[in-house]
Amino acid sequence: MQSPDTVVLVHGLWMTPRSWEHWVAHYEGVGYKVLTPAYPGLEVEVEALRADPSPIANVTVPATVSYLEEIIGGLDSPPIIMGHSFGGALTQILLDK
């Protein structure tokens, strides 16, 4: 079995992928490809969400899990998946599928 070469970092609620920026540098520094997907519809910077948080109301667990499944399914090999806070709950759902 091939060792994973990709790390997928799933952020928590009220966060954006930017919350992982230091971890991205760490894992890329040791040779991993790193993906930090935003929840669907929240592909904006945190400042934009603070100014207009209305897109958050449209985020659902099923849609987010499906979106993450698409990203992970498009990889050449199974990744390492890590989630923070609610991202950890999404990670558990993904692993249970």
Image (cartoon, rainbow, N blue to C red):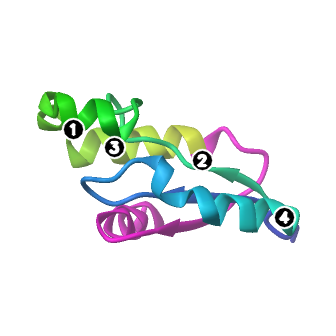
Q: Which numbered disc covers residue 97?
A: none
Residue type (three-letter) at the residue carrying disc 1 = Arg
Q: Locate residue 42 relative to residue 22 in the image: left or right.
A: left
Mark nearer the viewer, 3 or 4: 4
Coordinates of residue 5 in the picture (x, y in percent) = 82, 60
Counting residues from the start of the chain, the first of labels 3 and 4 encountered is 4
Number of residues whose C-alpha sits closer than 10 Å to that of mark 2, classed few (under 14), some (14–19) or many (20 or more): many
Mark nearer the viewer, 4 or 2: 4
Q: Distance of mark 3 from mark 4, alpha carbons?
A: 28 Å
Task: Count the numbered circles shown.
Answer: 4
Give the magenta range.
72-97
The residue shown at (57%, 65%) is: 81
* SS at mark 1 in the image: helix
Counting residues from the start of the chain, the first of labels 1 and 2 encountered is 1
Q: Which residue is labeled 1 in the image?
A: 50
Counting residues from the start of the chain, the first of labels 1 and 3 encountered is 1
The residue shown at (16%, 34%) is: 53
Tag 1 near tag 2, CB within 8 Å: no
Q: Is residue 69 magenta?
A: no
Mark nearer the viewer, 1 or 4: 1
* SS at mark 4 in the image: helix
Q: Locate residue 67 relative to residue 27 in the image: left or right.
A: left
Q: Distance of mark 1 from mark 2, alpha carbons?
A: 29 Å
Coordinates of residue 24 in the picture (x, y in percent) = 67, 58
Tag 4 near tag 2, CB within 8 Å: no
Q: Distance of mark 1 from mark 4, alpha carbons?
A: 31 Å
Counting residues from the start of the chain, the first of labels 1 and 4 encountered is 4
Counting residues from the start of the chain, the first of labels 4 and 2 encountered is 4
Q: Which numbered disc covers residue 64?
A: 3
Q: Which residue is labeled 4 in the image?
A: 29
Q: Distance of mark 1 from mark 3, alpha carbons?
A: 20 Å
